[in-house]
Amino acid sequence: MDPQRLLRLYAHGETNFTGFNLNGINLFGADLIKVVFKEANLTRANLVLSYLNQAVLTKADLESANLSGSNLNYANLMNANLHNADFHGASLQNADLRNANLTLATFIDANLMNSDLRGVDLSGANLSGACLVGANLRKEARTYVAVMRGANLSRVDLRSTDLTGADLTGVNLSGANLTNATLREANLTDANLSEAILNNTSLISSNLSGANLKGASLINSQLAKSNFTKADMTDVNLQGAIMSLVKLNKAIMIRANLNGARLNKADLTRADLSNASLIDADLVETYLARTNFSDANLTKAKLIRADISATNLAGAILEEAVMPDGTIYY
């Protein structure tokens, strides 16, 4: 359809273009608020700076479409094909993107606040600098399972976002803000979380094996039963974190801040905590086989019933620490 004809029809009150073939149409800057493009073919369409607030785009094909700078607040994009689409700087606040295909899509600096992203496939997508505050990526049974393998989420604002059960394998979250986010049972295997902010974040029963957490901040985070096997946690801040039953086998935690952290029954087998600070940390019944605490600060740490027979404590500070047998070290 000719773009001018479509705009004339819209201006005269026609808003329903369900199933129309609009392949490659140029609607640059168009005012199409509440338009219905359900199941329409909009592949390679030019929708730059367009107004699509509250638009209905369910099952629409927008592959390789350009929507940079467009306004899609409250739009319905359920089950839409957005493969390789460009949403650079677009606003999708409160948009419904459930089960949409967002593979290789670009969302650089986009606004996705409070959007519904349950079940989306963001594999290979670039969300660098995007805002996802309050977005919902929660896994719900088999209906909605968000997939973000290999996505670029560096510097993304994910505060208070629900990522329960999300697949974030190999995702780049360097410098991202995940304060108060929920990542229970999420898969973050080999993810890059260097310099990320995860304060007060819930990562209970999550998998972060092989992840890069260099310089990350996880102050007062909930990490019980999570897996950090072989993770690089150099200079990480875990002050006050709850880490009961956590797996830290062969984790690199050089200079880590674990002051006041609760590590009871955690597995630190072969972990490197040299020069780490564990002041007043709870290490009750922890597994410390060949753990390296050389030059670490364990002042007032609780090591009750912990096995330190094969632990490297060379140069460690143990002032007023409660030893495995219950005695206080002086």
Image: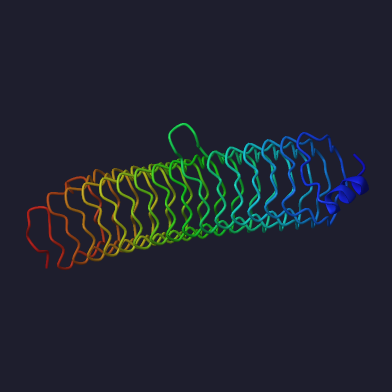
Name the image quarter holding the N terminus.
top right
Residue at image coords 38%, 61%? 200
Q: Quadrant of residue 50?
A: bottom right
Question: 322 above or below 41?
Answer: below
Q: Quadrant of residue 219?
A: bottom left
Residue at image coords 54%, 42%? 170
Query: Horizontal and vertical percent for residue 285?
Result: 17, 48
Name the image quarter holding the C terminus.
bottom left
Q: Say how many tags the image has.
A: 0
Q: How is the image coloured?
A: rainbow
Asked if residue 248 lies left or right of residue 18, the reply is left
Question: 138 above or below 214?
Answer: above
Asked if residue 315 lies left or right of residue 178, the reply is left
Return the residue found at the far front. 13
Query: Horizontal and vertical percent for residue 122?
Result: 61, 41
Query: Horizontal and vertical percent for residue 237?
Result: 39, 62
Q: Quadrant of residue 77?
A: top right
- Identify which residue, 270 or 42, lies in the foreground: 42
Asked if residue 174 lies left or right of residue 286, the reply is right
Residue at image coords 61%, 44%? 97
Asked if residue 311 lies left or right of residue 215, the reply is left
